[in-house]
Amino acid sequence: AQTVTQSQPEMSVQEAETVTLSCTYDTSESDYYLFWYKQPPSRQMILVIRQEAYKQQNATENRFSVNFQKAAKSFSLKISDSQLGDAAMYFCAYRSERTGFNTDKLIFGTGTRLQVFP
Amino acid sequence: KAGVTQTPRYLIKTRGQQVTLSCSPISGHRSVSWYQQTPGQGLQFLFEYFSETQRNKGNFPGRFSGRQFSNSRSEMNVSTLELGDSALYLCASSKGLREDSGANVLTFGAGSRLTVL
């Protein structure tokens, strides 16, 4: 069974600084997607960034980028130029992309609460 | 375009009662999946439906059930409520099939907050 681990329950960063959130996962599959979701106090989950396992190039979305280390099964999120609006819970998630098996099932980590200080 | 709509947003029930939660997906989305979020267990997958068929199921007791209608709207039902069923129930929708260009992206609703007394 696949598992996702986020070892940092809480992180804090100063506005305009950079912060990195960690995520490790365990799987025996070769095809999968990894995601970072943000859950602000409104509780609505918002997709931040996604990474396909077969792509070596790290995904980037504006101020958000990932460091994907497939061999180490590590998938960290870097937030550059942090803004007050980045304060939220961040969840790392895994989804299987096994051939012939269509599913939207996400396996989530326990989350990291990010505080942003002015 | 309209997002994923979940109703009701908040509800309070007592032990032993049953509850039905509704999820209207984004227009054109054929897949709906459900998640339970609690402080103790985190986010856990309940089940997913695609074209009115349950495609995958999480590890929850039979008191948790769901269905999907021909218009892709989905409902989940919890019977004989227990205190531990108090949670935020999140619904997410997607097109349902992998596209050639990449992942099927999930869009989440705002959730239904269930409190069991």
Image (cartoon, coloured by chain):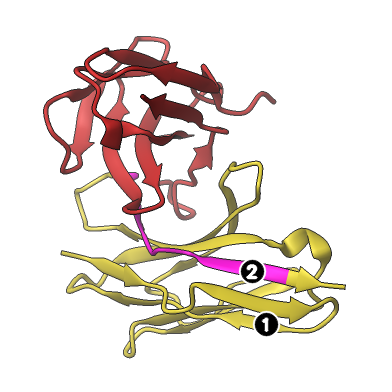
Residue A53 painted magenta: no
Asked if residue B23 can be seen in this view, the reply is: no
Residue A107 painted magenta: yes
Q: Position of residue B22 (x, y in %)?
A: 43, 17
Out of B68 and B102, give the one closest to the viewer.
Answer: B68
Residue mark closest to the camera, 1 vs 2: 2
Measure how far apart labels 1 and 2 are at the Cα level. 9 Å
What stretch of residues is rendered in magenta? Answer: A104-115
Q: Residue at 49% across / 72% down in the picture?
A: A9
Q: Position of residue B102 (x, y in %)?
A: 46, 55
Out of A60 and A111, give the one closest to the viewer.
Answer: A111
First-in-chain label (1 vs 2): 1
Q: Which chain is the one coloured yellow? A: A
Horizontally, residue A108 falls left or right of residue A61, namely left
Q: Residue furthest bottom?
A: A72
The residue singled out by tag 1 in the image is: A19
What amino acid does circle 1 point to? Val
Marker disc for residue A114: 2
What amino acid does circle 2 point to? Leu
Q: Residue furthest left?
A: B62
